[in-house]
Amino acid sequence: MSVRDEREIDQEALKKIWADTLDVIERRISKPAFQTWFKDDLEVQIKNDVLCIRCIDNPFRADWLDNRYKTLIFESFRDVSGQACDVEIYSNEDKVYSFANTSQQDERDSTKHQQVAKEIQTLKNIVSDYQEKLEHLQEVVNLQAEEILNLKERVSKVET
């Protein structure tokens, strides 16, 4: 087992919490089940309040843990750490969560965030421009409506 820290819990604390979590799980399930599904080859880290578990050896194991033991993992981790984290379980093949180069991913996320913020500001400016144009057009329509009413009054006076 290897443990990596992201922010919430330091590496040594997470390593101890995970070991204690495994002890709790081992007491709650049969020894063969524990040996099969929880022994060795699990990488664990916390990122953004999510307990991420990566099964190194095979995707079937990740799927089995996710479908059969996710609640047990959640409850055991919560009981040991006092922290209710979401649990995500992956295999090497999932490539959903990168355990390496998280700083590069954070940098890419930050860049994307900045790009989205710029796009949002551009859209806000466009909306503001259209609102000004709409207000101007509304004024023109109101003036023309007044002129039409005035013309109708004149026509009505002329006819009488």
Image (tube, grey):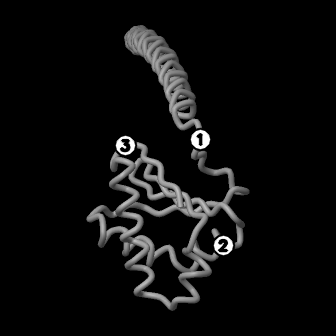
How far apart are the two marked residues, 3 and 1, measured between alpha carbons? Answer: 15 Å
Q: Which mark is residue 7?
A: 3
- Of 123 and 64, which appears nearest the observer? 64
Residue 33 image point, x, y percent: 57, 86
How far apart are the two marked residues, 3 and 2, measured between alpha carbons? Answer: 27 Å
To which residue does mark 2 refer? 61
- Of 94 and 33, which appears nearest the observer? 33
- Residues tagged 3 and 1 counted as in contact (Cβ below 8 A): no
Residue 136 image point, x, y percent: 43, 10
Q: Secondary structure at mark 1?
A: loop
Mark 2 is surrounded, within 10 Å at the Cα level, by few (under 14), some (14 to 19) or many (20 or more) other residues, namely some
Q: Which mark is residue 100?
A: 1
Q: Residue at x 41, y 47 (%)?
A: 48
Q: Residue at x 58, y 89 (%)?
A: 32
Q: Secondary structure at mark 2?
A: helix
Q: Residue at x 45, y 73 (%)?
A: 73
